[in-house]
Image: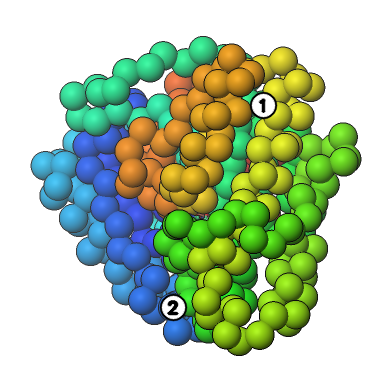
Amino acid sequence: MTILAIDTSCDETAVAVTKARRIISNELFSQIETHRKWGGVVPNLAKRAHEERIDGVVESALKKAKKSMENIDAIAVTYGPGLAIALGVGITKAQELAKKYKKKLIPVNHMEGHIYSCFAQDEHEQPTKDFEFPYLVLLVSGGHTELVLFTDHITYEILGQKLDDAAGEALDKGARLILENDIYPGGPMLEKMARGGSATYIDFPRPMSHSSELNFSFSGLKTSLLYALKKISKEEREAHKNDIAASYQEAVFDSLCIKLKQAIVKTGVKKLLVAGGVAANQTLRDKIKNLVEKQKGSVLFPTFKSLYGDNAAMIGIAGYFRSEKGLFAKNIETVDRVPRASLDDLEVF
Ligand code: KG4
Ligand code: ZN
């Protein structure tokens, strides 16, 4: 089963060719430069950029894979969650290709793509790690923070989720407050700033840590940062930027780890998967590895660096496991965007 996969859920125009768990090609046009000056993703600019780039990215994914549409067995496309008008561009392209070349269409949830990114292989099937269900999954991206029980292929139970800002959003907003500009995305910048800084310079709260619920809340933390910055002089802020960044980042990551530990205790599941853009952060990965070691568990992160952020290879791999269950769209025409799609309410169309 060779799959052409498309993801236009946010600010990357992504197309890949995959075969089961193997990535044959994984192409991407990033719109970061378009959105940077606005301090975040502007939906109508994203839509236009997707429309301008999608044909070129499809072409280059096929070319890199040395395939033509005739060699493709099915098309996988993200139906949600994501920005409505951005999702629409990928879905329309997938429908057009499916009709023109008479291919089956597999609608995929973007977050299940992030989960399957932990099982991706290269063209030569490396690395190989078999599925050993159940897994406890922490999804950390710009729009989502979720704890999920992954009990079997394409079967998820949400244990907890964000009540306000997502972890990535908290990092993005924090970086903007510390740097006093509209930097986007702030997560990688905060990681750089925090390097060598003291994580105990400011004692930020660990939101939700006393609650037995597995939900996350980060908006209060952002307010704490705002107050902390107001209290100090310009000179102190300048001199201690890395300490402030390290303390704030630590509070976000500690909050994630506290819930992760609670979830391990609650479920007894010690095999972890951690995915999404924020998992690219080395400090977070080290903290999680530490936690897992203490709990005598194990953790998998996305197999390759290119799979932390948004990409289409992860959609192709999740699409393959959907196809194994016969979850093809029954009617290509009715496949539609679901901006608030949830993992425990999977669409098939
Ligand atoms: O999964 P992703 O690429 O897109 C969404 O589906 O949201 O996640 C993007 C998020 C942004 O908030 C970005 O700041 C964050 O991931 N991010 C990072 C790092 N790289 C990306 N956060 C912390 N450290 C990083 N190195
Ligand atoms: Zn994502």
Which mark is in front, 2 or 1?
Answer: 2
- Above or below — where is 121 with respect to 295? below
Circle 2: residue type: Arg
What residue is shown at x 75% (from left), y 33% (from top)? 159
Inter-mark Cα distance, 2 to 1: 35 Å
Question: Callout 1 environment at 10 Å: few (<14), some (14 to 19), or many (20+)?
Answer: many
Secondary structure category for the residue under label 1:
strand
Question: Callout 2 environment at 10 Å: few (<14), some (14 to 19), or many (20+)?
Answer: some
The picture places residue 278, in percent across and down from the top left corner, at 51, 50
Residue 36 numbered tag = 2
Residue 3 numbered tag = none
Secondary structure category for the residue under label 2:
helix
Q: Earlier in the sequence, mark 2 or mark 1?
A: 2
What residue is shown at x 41% (from left), y 36% (from top)? 302
**Residue furthest bottom in the image:** 234
Nearer to us in this view, 244 or 69: 244
Residue 149 numbered tag = 1
What residue is shown at x 27% (from left), y 46% (from top)? 26
Is residue 91 at least partly visible in the picture? no
Is residue 186 at least partly visible in the picture? yes
Quadrant of the rendering where the N terminus is positioned: top left
Circle 1: residue type: Leu
